[in-house]
Amino acid sequence: MTAAEQSSEQQARSSRTVQLVSFTVGNEEYGVDIMAVREIRAWSETTPLPNTPEVVRGVINMRGAIVPIFDLRARFGMPRTEPDKYNVVIIVSVASRIVGILVDAVSDIITINEDEIRAMPSMEQVNGVGFMEGLITVGERMVGLIGLERMFSGRMLEAADSSTRPMLSSPSEQASAA
Amino acid sequence: MDDLAQFRQTFFTECEELLGDLEGHLMTLQAGEGDINTLNAVFRAIHSVKGGAGAFGFDRLVNFAHIFETVLDLMRDGRLEPTPDSVLLVLRCADILSDLVRAAQNDTELPPDHEDEGRKALIALAASIGVNADPNAADDELAALDAQLAAGGPDAVIAAAASAEPEPAPAAAAAPAKAPLLKYLVKFTPRDALYQRANEPLILIRELRELGGFLARADASTIPPFDQMQAEGAYIKWEFEIETDKGEQAIRDVFEFVLDDCELEVTCLNPPAEAAAPASEAPAKAEAAEPSPAPTAAAVTATPKPQAAAAGTAPKAEAAKPAGTKPAGAKAEGAAPEGGKAVRSIRVDLDRVDKLVNMVGELVITHAMIAQQTEHLHADQHPELANGLAELSHHIRDLQESVMAMRAQPVKSVFARLPRLVRELAVATNKKIRLDMSGENTEIDKTVIEQLGDPLTHMIRNSCDHGIETPEERIAAGKPAEGVIHVSADQRGGRIVIEISDDGRGINRDKVMKKALEKKLIPPDAVLSNEEIDNLIFLPGFSTADTVSNISGRGVGMDVVRQNIQSLGGRVHIQSRPGQGSSFILTLPLTLAVLDGMVLKVGDQSYILPLANIVESLRPEPDQINMVANSSEVLRIRGEYVPLVYLHRIFKVQNGIDDPTKALVIIVELEDGSKMGLVVDEIIGQQQVVIKSLEENFDPIRGVGAATILGNGRVSLILDVAGIKHIAENETQRPGNQNRQLAAPALQASA
């Protein structure tokens, strides 16, 4: 263990810090845990998958791996993103799968203490809120923390209509389905 | 996985290979084509299994292998004649041995008398020429030796002579080409690693003692004072004097598994006079007065073989080499029996090979991409680039072939299980069945091989149970009492063809028809060709056996076979001639990593259709297209009606051509034999594509089998025609509800 790691460990004991990559969808700002982010790439044309929900934009070739891309705007119940070259795809790894999230733009890297994350207000579970893990205030901005595990831990295709359902199947589910 | 578990794993992997080889050699023996080399190979296989088993303490396995080995040793010495009966016994014992190995592997206990019959027969066989093969009789002496060793204390130098000379002299004299009894001094110094790898010198010593008159000295002088002793250290050295006619190699063989972990010196104390090498054997080498220790085949054959010179008969593979020509240590290994054919292979983790296969796939794609990017450049302006690309393409193709060859394995490994299966089935059904095999060396991708076992077993069972008649029936039909099942493998085109044919009664078509109608598997007014009737047996839920036997006939067999083969990208069908027999014909792709596909265009999308599915493609005339029930269209082609399925409708692709007479109809054949006309815009061309899993990062999608990456770097989907048919059928059934229906994951499909 290096000295740096040790000191961060000590820090963590008092209050663990979390780093988030934040991005915008429309006028709203969201963040995901930086540890899950594999890379950030510009939008490129996808190969559509037949008979899949709106939220599935299709698949891309990422150095030989077939990676599905999800449209976060559509996930929030809004119309699909009309992507141009300024749109960004955040590639994340979740539950041993690699998936991409289509967003408008990456805005910041935020370092916060874990105890600064506010729980979601107990409002009705409207579209898209089911996978939110909490809210953060950064200066004047509010950033929604997205729980990737929640978003992608069921079967992907079912995610379209019900926001409470996760988008990827868990490994055990997969095994039994296979 | 700890070290021991890992070694155990390796041991069982090796056992599997050894037993596989063994089965092959036994088949040769059974066919009466075996020679001394075959017997030697059989012996070595059993010996290796025994050696490994000893190291892991599988006593029961060791015990049986030991008796087995003794008998085989007698056979290869020529003291036991390999009669049909004794070969049959050897076959049966090989089965028992593999049962024991399997039981050890799975930590299960076989019934205590499982090997008794074979064991008794072996002992009896050995006893018939006056050899006691039962190690338990000898154990008492060894226990005495152990006790002596234990009592001696650390400084004692113990000498213990084996009381019984295990080989009766008369038999030895009678044996042809008997090697002279030579006295060897063996110095054996284990290193620490020997013990750390769970080896037990006592087992080695016991085995050494089998070779002949024996004197062991333990040198305990290097044992340090107790407080300085390392618990896992190796302190004791041994010296053995052995008088044997088996030769030096036999002594070295005992230490085969520990060679790297000990110092071993074998010297002959009374080397026979240097005999001139028989000129006929290796004239080129004969002039070399000093045989070089180089472990080449030539050197080995040229090594003077005293016993051959003395008796003038065929040399034995395990020749006793005179000490003067003795190559030391590792070199002796290289010059092992069978003319110094050193094993030139390494064990590589399959994951590593898979990674390599993937990388080559990437390389293929990247190359296609570069080639496409540079297409517009004139070759004469950039000659180096054009040449370089052409060369690269050549190298990549070579590389791809070599890598695929690494994954390829001879089908022998699956075929090896069949003889036993047939033997057992013949006994269970009271039939006489002979198994012939050919093309065992045909190579297929390892993943295909692994999944081939079950379907093959099913088909063989089916042939034994339904195909081959009882001996009485056969004789009545004017056939030999013994039925023959022939299993062959062959590469034709880009595919592997495996054929399982029997000379039995063939398919009773009337009975099959009746059964299919009874079970409502076909419509009552169906008119089927003979071939179509025969292939009804692959339908789910079909069984013709009047009584359900425990071999086959539960009606789950053949449709499972078809499913298994299909999941490998293969096909299976049956050909039958009543009264003369039937053949299952199975075609399989060479590999699962690449696929020959046709690139299709529909609207602005391109898809890959596996070539194996395509029957033909055509642009139909308007009068070939008929409406059925005002909803679905069928295409009439040579008197057959084929339903039309529009790919752009199924996949909701924009701008697809709606008029089949302006589009293209590809007739595809589904695995159940039905046909479908797929309407697409155009065919781009044929291409070999690298198969990529979609499920790795996503869920299965109906109608899509997998994905691939085309030359432009874009992902293209590989079509699954069965899935497309399913969508088409559901769409016509429930037109209003299609979206919801289709968006549902393929759970039902797998259920």
Image: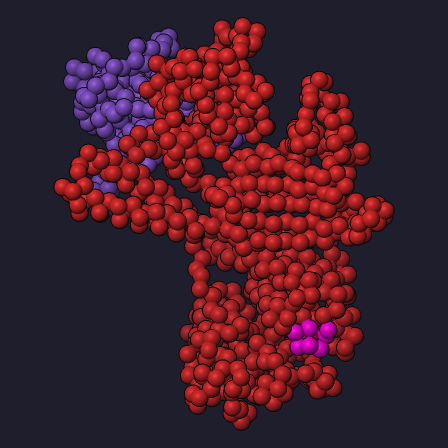
Q: Report the magenta stretch's main SS.
A: loop
Q: Is residue A99 magenta?
A: no
Picture coordinates of residue B132, whole percent (x, y)? 74, 75
The answer to which of B650 and B633 lies nearer the viewer is B633
At a point 48% along the width and 28% down the height, the residue shown is B616
Indicate the chain coloured red by its letter. B
- B603 with respect to B660 (left or right): left
For the question of whether residue B51 can be seen, the reply is yes
Picture coordinates of residue B528, whole percent (x, y)? 68, 25
Indicate the chain coloured purple by its letter. A
Quarter-of-image position of residue B698: top left
Picture coordinates of residue B566, whole percent (x, y)? 55, 34
The answer to which of B638 and B129 lies nearer the viewer is B638
Magenta stretch, residue numbers: B75-81
The answer to which of B178 and B196 lies nearer the viewer is B178
- A64 with respect to B658 (left or right): left
Q: Quadrant of the C terminus of chain B?
A: top right
Outermost residue on the left side: it is B381
